[in-house]
Amino acid sequence: MEVEQGRVKSGAVELNYMTAGQGQVVVLVHGLSGSNHWWHKTLPALAAHYRVYALDLAGFGGSRTGPSFELRTAANQLIDFLDKLGVEKASLTGHSMGGFIVADLAARHPDRVEKLVLVDAAALPFENSFLDRGLGLALAACKIPPAFWPVFLADAYRAGPRTLWRAANELMAADIARDLELIQAETLVVWGKQDHLVPLSLGVELTRRLHHARFEIIPGAAHTPMLERPAEFNRLLLDFLRK
């Protein structure tokens, strides 16, 4: 499988991405402190059937040219990304903060979304204390496969504390709960059963608020099921996209 690298200019930001495969378009959007490398076990499986794009959000990974990350503009940048590539409609998959972004896009631009996949998505507000969030983050980090730790640390270092702090605070303050009913796309909600960072109960509530949603739990996984249980995650994703 040949993986191509590319860049798309969106305003003052250059968005870095990798892509592979042919066919209908699937876009993968990482979470806080992530990059397109977080999909390295997902992209090959999908690229056998689809044209897959895994991008770096502004301020993360290889997309650090220009203004820093702003949650309120992320969905618009993703729309611009699709426009620049000439993609009218795509299936969107978002993890954690990326789940918030693709849900926001699907609510505001339903005509641009074929199918929607929300992976341990931070799309609903939750009342965890600062201590609880810190503990949840520590537990989530412990579940990341040891071989992936160099990427995890490198991505956090490249984003920098200012971007991470700003993105985390914007995410905790944002609320699109009322907009979820505007989402028309068929949706797959996937959750790691042992996610202590974004609780499983939020996945249940998120599914309940969506019109056309299916909820799947991956046992043994925490906040990053695409890394912790890639075979099961990829099977669920492909099964959903193919139907």
Image (tube, helix red, strand yellow):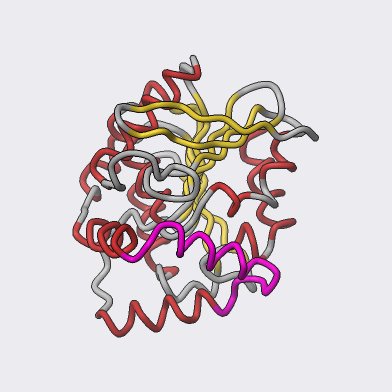
| Residue 35 against residue 83 in the figure, above or below | below
**Quadrant of the rendered structure where residue 113 is?**
top left
What x and y, as percent, mark residue 214? 51, 48
For the stretch drawn in magenta, the main secondary structure is helix
| Residue 79 against residue 222 in the figure, above or below | above
Residue located 27% across and 76% down the image: 128
In the image, residue 156 lies in the stretch drawn in magenta: yes
Query: How many numbered marks, from 0 up?
Result: 0
What x and y, as percent, mark residue 32? 41, 58
What x and y, as percent, mark residue 121? 42, 56
Tell me if I can see residue 12 in this picture: yes
Residue located 40% across and 68% down the image: 198
- Decide which of 232, 70 is in the foreground and name it: 70
Left/right placement of residue 109 relative to residue 179 reads right
Which residues lie in the magenta part? Answer: 142-161
In the image, residue 185 lies in the stretch drawn in magenta: no
Left/right placement of residue 115 relative to residue 83 reads right
Left/right placement of residue 57 relative to residue 144 reads left
Residue located 40% across and 45% down the image: 64
| Residue 113 against residue 144 in the figure, above or below | above
